[in-house]
Image (cartoon, rainbow, N blue to C red):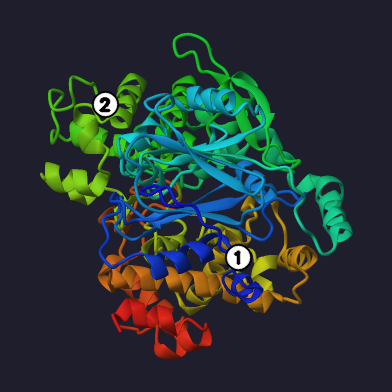
Amino acid sequence: MNLTDGSIAVETPEESFYRKYFGGTGFIAYYLLKQLPKGVDPLGPENNLIFALGPMTGHPLAGSGRNSVGAKSPLTGAIGFSEAGGFWGPELKKAGFDAVIIEGKSEKPCYIYIHDGQAEILDGRSVWGRTTGEVEDIIKQETGEPRVRVAQCGIAGEKKVRYACVLNDIFHAYGRAGMGAVMGSKNLRAIAVRGTQDVPEEEPQKILELARTMATDRKEEWEELKDTGTSGGVVSLHTQSALPTRNFQFGQFDGNEKISGQTMRDTVLLNRDNCYACPINCKRVVKTGDPYNVDPRYGGPEYETVAALGSTCGIDDLPAVCKGNELCNAFGLDTISAGVCVGFAMECYERGILTREQLDGVDARFGNPHGMLALLEKIARREGVGDLLAEGTLRAARKIGGGSEDFAMQVKGQEIPMHEPRLKMGLGIGYALSPTGADHCHNIHDTGYVKGSRSARSYGILDPIPAEDLGPQKVRLLAYMLSRRHFGNCVGLCDFVGWQDDDVVTMVRAATGWNCNLWELVKVGERAMTLARLFNIREGFTDKDDILPKRFYEPFLTGPIAGVAPTLEQVEKAKRDYYEMMGWDRNTGIPGRAKAMELDIEWALDAALGK
């Protein structure tokens, strides 16, 4: 779909293409490498924005609401992709499409309406400059379809905030890498979808059996997640020194109980919400009164948001965190990057690098909820100091100077998620290696393997591995699990549901009719990850960009992991070992010719190397 000339075309790939690249980030990496010229401006009309479903998106299974959006990232200059659940992806599948590729730029604000095999570009001036809730109401009215599902970029996307996100149904966020800014740069405010077609299935009865099993026989596996949501582990993370506090200066937060999932449940929780076909209801819906008056329409904070706007900013006021979440969802901000940018500004303020005058009079002390909320709104609108912070911590630090780059908590320009690599050291290597910049989803969480793991045993990793280990066993675990995690971004399933690998193989076979096995599916993930790596190499990234912030080499002085931190030498060795295990050059991190041949993507290696 080309917004410059208004043309719309439909492509129907061969089945072999689907089986090789699968969907989600596999589609995104393929099309970005094939279609984008080298060096394209992420906020220019030549960048493409791609919404891509997976084979499991839209089937009646827990976790099947998941799908991806990708482009060249305006935050990092590398490949960018992000995933979300909700109902938009399944609706697109029911409308007859597996992906939407947006090219060019509209002369005036617009939105796209897709419905049962048809698509049209509509005048979007009525929705420009409005909150996400207002936009959804207007589009439902203008299309005359109350059941339409809307994905949109928000005012932050219109303003090209480099970490603006895309949201569907107002609070399901494709949070990372600035996809909302790409959408806004095209004068595209939203994509509305309505579908009534059946989703094809080879073995529908098998799909239903799996769905019933998760909803009934395995209910005990997800009851806690339903009860307290993803922030149910806040207190535990504090106990382990793994709760990012005051811009990652500390791992413990005295106010941890005040912002926990348990406190949310007992105080401000109004309801629990879900994604398509999922019985878990892990989504929070909150409501608060004075002084913040949080609108439940904007949902409630997940763990990442609680930690980013809470402990990372030193704030233990849960209603204020909920208000911050509402602002981010109403304006279209990634809560992780937004919270880390605010925490960065607070540290600059407390160190005397930024003055109150430079912060437009905002009192940006750690722990001040009013300062956090004021900065969020300034960022979303790019007003005053918000224009600087909207660039992300790396660009902001380079402009501010004064040593602030040392506490710009980012990798490749993308802010660090709310997980601590001084405890989870393999996760830290995953941060450094991630093609999109620091990411916690296509990564490992080391504490899940300290007593052994059923999922790891499927890959021949039979023994427990300590969280602080960075030896060959941990690197092998990382190599296998990162490929598996990237496959998860291709297939269209949520990680929180708890499907085992055998389940996933069964459901993919039942949905597609392909006689696939786990080895093939993991290779799909490795292929997608390698394509992303090759895109970045083509754009000028090297092994020197696979690094961690200096702060993570500095151990905490107190707490259960006091004195423990990875060394630069350990990280470099683990990184080089990973390269070699993956069939990449140990010195440069460039995938080798034999690896490209094995994955059947020699064309991508040639594109990356300019051949």
Q: State which tag comes first along the sequence, 2 or 1.
A: 1
Tag 2 secondary structure = loop
Q: Position of residue 464 (x, y in %)?
A: 61, 69
Name the residue: 36% across, 22% down.
Answer: 369
Tag 1 secondary structure = loop
Name the amino acid, label 1: Thr
Q: Is residue 402 above or below residue 564?
A: above
Name the residue: 72% across, 58% down.
Answer: 499
- The crowding category of the residue bearing disc 1, from other C-alpha atoms within 10 Å (few below 14, some 14 to 19, many at least 20), is few
Which of the 4 quarters of the picture holds residue 463? bottom right
Q: Position of residue 372 (x, y in %)?
A: 33, 26
CB atoms at circles 2 and 1 under 8 Å apart?
Answer: no
Residue placed most toward the observer, 147 or 313: 147
Residue placed most toward the observer, 36 or 590: 36
Q: Which residue is mark 2?
A: 365
Q: Position of residue 537 (x, y in %)?
A: 31, 72
